[in-house]
Amino acid sequence: MSVSILGVRHHGPGSARAVRDELARLRPDAILIEGPPEADALVRLAPELEPPVALLAHVPGTPARAAFWPFAGFSPEWQAILYGVAAGIPVRFCDLPAAHSLAEPASAPEAVEPGELRVDPIGALARAAGYDDPERWWEDVVEHRGDTPFEVIAEAMAAVREGYQPDEREARREAYMRRTLRAAVKEGFERIAVVCGAWHVPALTGPLPAAKDDNAILRGLPKVKAELTWVPWTYGRLAWWSGYGAGITSPGWYDHLFAVPDRPVERWLAGAAAALRDEGLAVSPAHVIESVRLAHSLAGLRGRPLAGLSEVTEAARAVLCEGDDLAVELIQRRLVVGDRLGQVTDGTPMVPLQRDLRDQQRKVRLRPDALDRELDLDLRKPLDLSRSHLLHRLRLLGVRWGVPGASRGKGTFRETWTLRWQPEFDLELIERAALGTTVAAAAAQHARDVASGAVTPIGGADPTSLAELTGLVERCLLADLPEALPEVLAALSARAALDTDVTHLMAALPAMVRAHRYGDVRGTSAEGLAVIVHSMVDRICVGLPVSVTGLDDGAATDLLGHVDAVHAAVALLEEDGDRPETPTPRSRWLVTLRGICDRQDLHGLIEGRLTRILLDAGDLDDAGDRMSRAMSRGQTPARAAAWVEGFLAGGGLLLVHDPRLLGLVDEWLTGLGGEQFIEVLPLLRRTFGGFAAPERRAVGERVRSAGRHQEAAEADLDERRAAAAAKTVLTILGRDHG
């Protein structure tokens, strides 16, 4: 009977190649691998999966209790799994069960592999060898060799761990590894291979502690019910410092080293050149040849056995990229880290919600990607409309696969999304599994739960607030969830009837108006929504005159934002064609603003903005007189500046096309004293700084042109030369009296 302990570096390509070769030499009849033993039944699925993938362990009903064990194609553990499955021998995980590790209090908000070490053994060995970078030391000693000296690594780890006392958590893990090893020996296996992190090798070799001592360490551990499955992973996530991901800042480079043992430097730089050419950069074969020479020369100068990532990066920067940092960043993103997203098969254990999402993704032809992908949708097309519904439903469930952006086209039938799949989304789907078996059913149930106040909206907002309920209506319409709308609208109507704060109503109205339009554009019925919208407009018109009194600068700025939002919203509401005698929401709104605008107790910012709104609406014909009064000497400079800020908040083109208004502003500015000008300068800078560059340029040209005309008119006359012409004019006019 023999036991071979193969100490490896997690995600090390050299270790992976060496493990594969060593297992072929040893031909073991059982393999033990560092990882949660509850996943033993999932090992058989490995050959059907496309790495990177991860084992996900979670506690049902407890979202915070979850952990991932990621594997790449170049992970030694993954190669050991593939070997064992292909050879038909038992492959078992030997680390502390997830049922125990997940029972411990979470130490971080992000779920990670629970085997994270607080000691960096590779760093210690690198420092002992005179390296300041552990990554470079490991590459030189292990990854760039043709084989991995497992005995030497074991001796080195024993030296590093000399005198080291593991903490309680690590002691439990290593005690369970020894227990699993004893169980395999007891079962009668003759050739056992153990693949684990190099750090644990000394704990599994030499004289082992007595079984009763390990049992004492493991006795009474807290325990929870844990469920495990495979989920897709990304190379970007492998770059994290957490558990199995420790130190892997360049998974794309390591994948290359594992997949291309022959001439890796030459092939890498050729791939970098191809990536640059794909972006339209001119890179020739001569560039590649010269960059390879430079990389090998740098390695020789530094005494390295083979050019590493730092050497090929410097060579690419100097030759292929010609010093362009953006081009280097492209290589870093595409090749050094990589954009690979793993895949799992339909045979992998999944909750019904996950399976439905996979079916929906196939139906709407949207494949998950690890890199950002822009998606433009035309909602008049059935396929694009279905895609929009799916993405909005997932956002309602907190699965932010798609992030909506500003649409490039005009109209409400256009949407733009940025898609990027994250491994955590599978965990979020598992957490929402109790809501329904399909994405649509789960999203509708979540909306009903939020409307009833039974749950807090994803994101932590107040489920009973008017703004949250109006936003929920909008999201239900976007997601095409008509079955959830009646309950959500009922909750909204009840909340709106009780809310007496007009600013809450003003904040909620824009989302309601958008939802009303979505119901038309998308063909989604939203009966009762128009009645609520009209009622909210009426209550805003009644309550606003009371809310504009006694405002300080901050309150005036906040109210101004609400006024602009409501003004834009009512402009979207259609006229009531069935009852032409009924005032439209827009007309009621403008009448309200006109009544407020004539008051004398308004903040300058509010008065100026209302004047501009009414002027643009064609409902005011004395804007010049109002501006003249606002900037008269009887007003303080600060109030006058606030009035100008509010008036010009709609844009500066008005000053270009109306010389009188421009002259009033110019006259007021030039009449300010030095201290007064300094006092109002921040307001003026904020006002004019908000204009678009062409608007500022046009205003400046107008002011300069007016200045030239004034200078020409005030130029001194030559009275002697003008006397003859003046006498002639007077004679013509019959006013020459000698």
Image (spheres, grey):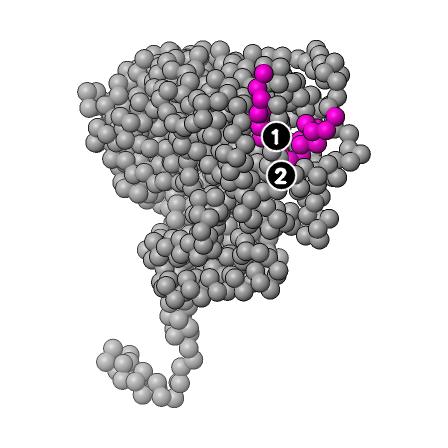
Q: Is residue 195 left or right of residue 376?
A: right
- The answer to whether any part of residue 497 appears in the image is no
Q: Is residue 520 left or right of residue 498?
A: left
Q: How busy is the neighbourhood of tag 1: few (under 14 within 10 Å), some, or many (20 plus)?
A: some
Q: Which residue is mark 1?
A: 4
First in residue order: circle 1 vs circle 2 = 1
Using the image as rendered, state which of residue 458 and residue 38 is in the foreground: 38
Q: Is residue 542 above or below residue 277?
A: above
Q: Which residue is mark 2?
A: 150
In the image, residue 528 lies at what x, y percent? 30, 15
> In the rendered image, which quarter contains the C terminus?
bottom left
> In the rendered image, which quarter contains the N terminus?
top right
In the image, residue 357 lies at what x, y percent? 35, 22
Using the image as rendered, state which of residue 473 and residue 389 is in the foreground: 389
- The answer to whether any part of residue 332 appears in the image is yes
| Segment tinted magenta in the rendering | 188-207
Q: Amino acid at mark 1?
A: Ser
